[in-house]
Amino acid sequence: MTEKTDVLREMDDSAVRLIRRLMRSARHAVIATLEPQTGNPIATRIGVSTDHDGTPITLVSALAAHTPALLADPRCSLLVGELGKGDPLAYARMTISAKAKEVIKGSADHTRIEWRYLSHLPKSKLYVGLGDFRFFRLEPENTKLNGGFGRAYQLEAKEWLSLSPVNAELAAAEKNAVDHMNEDHADAIALYARYYAKLPDGKWRITGIDADGFDIADGDEVARIFFEKPLESAKDMHMTLVRMAGEARAGLEADQTSA
């Protein structure tokens, strides 16, 4: 466990869930790297998604300053946080210390990561096939979370990553499940958005499913919905989504009756 100081709170389930929600719902972040020629820190905005275990992934051009920096020294820092009106320091954000690992083109990892990234960031289809672009997994080491005033935590990666033994099985089934839901069950996704995420009606689609939950999007709006308990198999994925649709429908009908 990471040594705690007086200003830090003890790690709890709410901190883990907040980190997972911030990371899974993020579409961009600020990455800090070390410039090879000078050793000076440089920071820039990047697009981000996540692998099945929650590890941040990014797609970068060889022409970007941070790409040769990551290749020369994989150490980096990632700032992820909420945006909104008013005082920016009142919003949750976290800094992840990580080491970048390039994803080899043509590998099974690349196929999985490319699909998840494009599903989460569909506009990246414009340049993902260009020869100078490559994926990196930004493998976390420790994380400093600020959930707002008076809510500071420090966690090791293993405390918040989704290190499920069924990740590989879920990854193999994910694309077909997501395509099926988006093409044939838009009504169920609408129920998820309204009941679990308290969102207005829209053209919501599922962008990814992992052991802990799933992500939905409608244009620029993104939301995270957690499962009641982690999935135990690919079959469990289907059964859980069916059950949640039923619960959402019943819950919304009950709300209308009591209104």
Image (cartoon, helix red, strand yellow):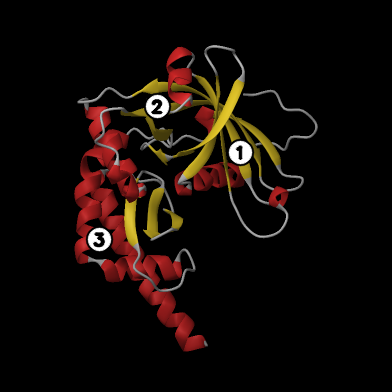
Badge 1 marks a residue whose secondary structure is strand
Choose the circle earlier in sequence order: 1 or 2.
2
Q: Amino acid at mark 1?
A: Met
Instruction: Report how many numbered discs are placed on residues in the image.
Output: 3
Furthest residue in direction right, as rendered: 6
The residue singled out by tag 2 in the image is 63
Residue at point 26%, 36% (across, down): 112
Q: Does the CB distance between marks 2 and 3 fall below 8 Å?
A: no
Label 1, residues with CA under 10 Å away: few <14, some 14-19, many ≥20: many
Marks 2 and 3, how far apart at CA: 35 Å
Q: Amino acid at mark 3?
A: Asn
Q: Amino acid at mark 2?
A: Leu
Q: Is residue 242 above or below residue 171?
A: below
Marks 1 and 2, how far apart at CA: 27 Å
Residue at point 44%, 28% (across, down): 64
x and y percentages locating residue 221 in the rendered image: 45, 60
- Numbered circle sitting on residue 182: 3
Marks 3 and 1, how far apart at CA: 31 Å
The residue singled out by tag 1 in the image is 94
Q: Left or right: 3 with respect to 169?
A: right
Badge 2 marks a residue whose secondary structure is loop
Q: Is residue 74 visible?
A: yes
Q: Left or right: 189 with respect to 142?
A: left
Q: Nearer the viewer, residue 196 or 219?
A: 219
Q: Nearer the viewer, residue 151 or 165?
A: 151
Choose the circle earlier in sequence order: 3 or 1.
1
Q: Is residue 71 above or below residue 96?
A: above
